[in-house]
Image: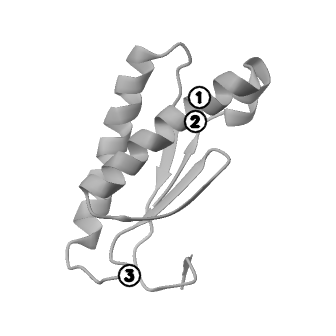
Amino acid sequence: MFADIVDFTKLSARISPEKLVELLNSIFSKFDELAEQFALEKIKTIGDAYMVVAGLPEQRTDHAEVIASMGIAMLNAIQQLNAEQEYKVNVRIGICSGPCSSGCYR
């Protein structure tokens, strides 16, 4: 699953670097908690993007269900964070299912 913040470039132009890092930290820390809760493998964060997988390094039969549950939990987390912080964000989430090699769908 990939997730990124909608209009992140515009947001980053409006706020200080310190506030931006604080915002990203609050979002990605919550996503990390969710990944642990759902027993998923975080691959990386880069800029405003977050990547997590189900079924790696160990296969699991519920990979599609659990990654969809993570996506819903991420949306709920963003809604909660938006209620608590000054800057409101939306996220885009994309899910791909199937065999992969080096993080690329094939």
Q: Which mark is residue 22?
A: 1
Query: Mark 1 and 2 residues: CB-CB less than 8 Å, in contact?
Result: yes
Q: Nearer the viewer, residue 52 or 94?
A: 52
What's the residue type where badge 1 is placed? Answer: Glu
Using the image, determine if residue 34 lies above or below residue 30. Answer: below
Decide which of tag 1 and tag 3 comes sooner along the chain.
1
What's the residue type where badge 3 is placed? Answer: Pro
Is residue 71 in sight in this rendering? no
User: How far is the residue under mark 1 from the one under mark 2?
Assistant: 6 Å
Using the image, determine if residue 13 lies above or below residue 49. Answer: above
- Residue 56 image position (x, y, % from top left): 38, 78
Decide which of tag 2 and tag 3 comes sooner along the chain.
2
Residue picked out by circle 3: 57
- Residue 28 image position (x, y, % from top left): 49, 43
Task: Please report the residue visible at 35 percent of the width from the left and 55 percent of the height from the top.
Answer: 35
Q: Nearer the viewer, residue 29 or 48?
A: 29
Q: Secondary structure at mark 3?
A: loop
Direction from residue 92 to residue 95 in the image, left or right? left
User: How far is the residue under mark 1 from the one under mark 3?
Assistant: 31 Å
Mark 3, residues whose alpha carbon is within 10 Å: few (<14), some, or many (≥20)?
few
* View extreme (left): residue: 61
What's the residue type where badge 2 is placed? Answer: Leu
Q: Secondary structure at mark 2?
A: helix
Direction from residue 8 to residue 89 in the image, left or right? left
- Residue 77 image position (x, y, % from top left): 35, 34
Residue picked out by circle 2: 24
Q: Quadrant of the C terminus?
A: bottom right
